[in-house]
Image: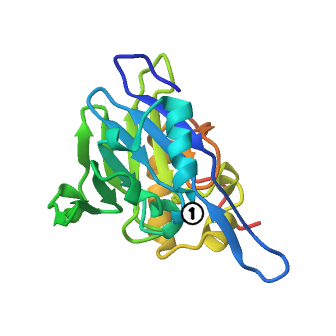
Amino acid sequence: MIGPSMFPLVSVLNIGHSYKFLKDGDMHANCTVTFIKGCKFNILVDTMTAWDGEKLKRLLKEEVNVEPENIHYVVCTHSHSDHTGGNYLFRNATHIVGTSMNYGERYITSPLDDGKEFLIEPKVKVVCTPGHTLDSVTVLVETGIDEKGLVAITGDLFEREADIEFPNLWRELAGSQNPEEQEKNRKKILEIADFIIPGHGPMFQNFYKNKEGGGGAGPSTSC
């Protein structure tokens, strides 16, 4: 867990993965799951597949001592099933799935509908970062200068750290509905984030932030 008490605390509960089977080319994937202990709310970002409910409950209990009924917001960085499958566990929470927000059968109008940021609480906000899917969002968390600074929980905007040097990982392995938009939004995150939590890998420090040019997107050619 990271961040002092006056700032949100961020904890990675599950490190995701993604790869293709060599024999038949099928994709094997599950997502990174992140818990945010906010100053006001408990927030969970991405919930794995529908087969992972018991695992997710166990991780919440063992890692951060939180029960599903005590989660206030569930944010799914996009609507793919390996990021939304455990949502059914959190019936006391407001759900944000990509740019759609609901509580039960009530679908809530929010700034995300117009491509604008949604503030969950003063140091935690959701911003639109389309590309991998057209509804993709990123959660930005200010954890304080003395800790991790600005943490960006990006979902599949970044597949994992290696895709900065090897963009075929996000362009071809993960796929992109709009590569041009994804490239643009990747650059935006690289310009501001101190740490990035990608969709299918561990958190990594953003060494591109302070490079000349404001944090480029890494090499532009595929490996």
User: Where is the C terminus found, in terms of image quarters?
Assistant: bottom right
| Residue 162 left/right relative to 98 | right
Report the front residue among 196 and 36. 36
| Residue 96 left/right relative to 158 | left
Report x, y in % for residue 101: 25, 60
- The residue where tag 1 is placed is 51
Indicate whether 182 appears above or below 127.
below
Q: Could one spot residue 196 in this view of the protein?
A: no
Q: Could one spot residue 103 in this view of the protein?
A: yes
Report x, y in % for residue 222: 71, 68
Q: How is the image coloured?
A: rainbow
Give the residue displayed 40% in from the left and 63% down from the top: 136
Report the front residue among 215 and 8. 8
Amino acid under label 1? Trp
Give the residue displayed 44% in from the left and 70% down from the top: 133
Give the residue displayed 65% in from the left and 73% down from the top: 172
Indicate whether 65 appears above or below 44.
above
Indicate whether 209 appears above or below 182.
above
- Furthest residue toward front: 54
Quadrant of the image occupied by residue 107: bottom left
Report x, y in % for residue 190: 51, 45
